Image: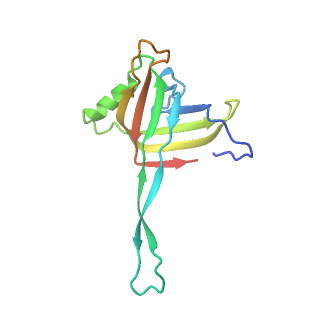
């Protein structure tokens, strides 16, 4: 799926599917995606009879930061409902999220990120400011079990 080219893609044309298959709905209109870091944790070890003092590494676990999605507050309650389902202990509330980067003409998907076993862990709004001019934003911070790229 990934389309290699010499010139970088701008990060302004993208779709976010929150696991419902509807990436073009009004509620799916995400303004910003902050990708998580992905780390391989290692265990450093060295045998006592090793001829050098260098350590060797064994990969133990993979750890991910959280995915952060931001959108303008439009009165949609779908993010709150998902967060609330997890708060209330619903066992089947995890989802698989797909983020697709589009080319400049928005005609083709050029790169895809898939986040499996995703669940919201933090739900926030920007401050209300009577003197401000910025629109109200809502943010959803999402933990997940694994990610893939294609």
Percent position (x, y) of residue 68? 45, 36
Q: Residue furthest top?
A: 130
Q: How is the image coloured?
A: rainbow
In terms of depth relative to the viewer, which is nearer, 107 or 79?
79
Image: 55 above or below 143: below
Q: Residue furthest left?
A: 88
Image: 6 above or below 126: below
Q: Residue furthest front?
A: 131
Residue at the (28%, 39%) spot, across then down? 91
Can residue 18 be seen?
A: no
Percent position (x, y) of residue 117? 39, 44
Can residue 27 be seen?
A: yes
| Image quadrant assignment for residue 127 | top left
Task: Tell whether 41 sits left or right of 107.
Answer: left
Residue at the (68%, 35%) spot, across then down? 103
Residue at the (48%, 25%) spot, across then down? 71
Residue at the (40%, 36%) spot, across then down? 141
């Amino acid at each position: 799926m990934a389309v290699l080219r010499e010139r970088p893609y701008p990060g302004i044309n993208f779709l976010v599917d929150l696991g419902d298959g509807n990436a073009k709905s009004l509620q799916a209109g995400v303004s910003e995606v902050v990708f998580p870091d992905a780390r391989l944790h290692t265990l450093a070890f060295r045998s006592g009879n090793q001829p050098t003092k260098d350590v060797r590494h064994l990969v133990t676990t993979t750890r991910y930061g959280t995915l952060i999605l931001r959108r303008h507050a439009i009165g949609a309650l779908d993010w709150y409902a998902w967060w609330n389902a997890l708060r209330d202990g619903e066992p089947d509330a995890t989802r698989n999220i797909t983020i697709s980067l589009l080319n400049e003409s928005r005609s083709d998907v050029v790169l895809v990120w898939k986040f499996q076993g995703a669940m919201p862990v933090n739900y926030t709004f920007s401050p209300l400011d009577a003197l401000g001019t910025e629109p109200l934003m809502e943010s959803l911070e999402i933990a997940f079990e694994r990610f893939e790229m294609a």
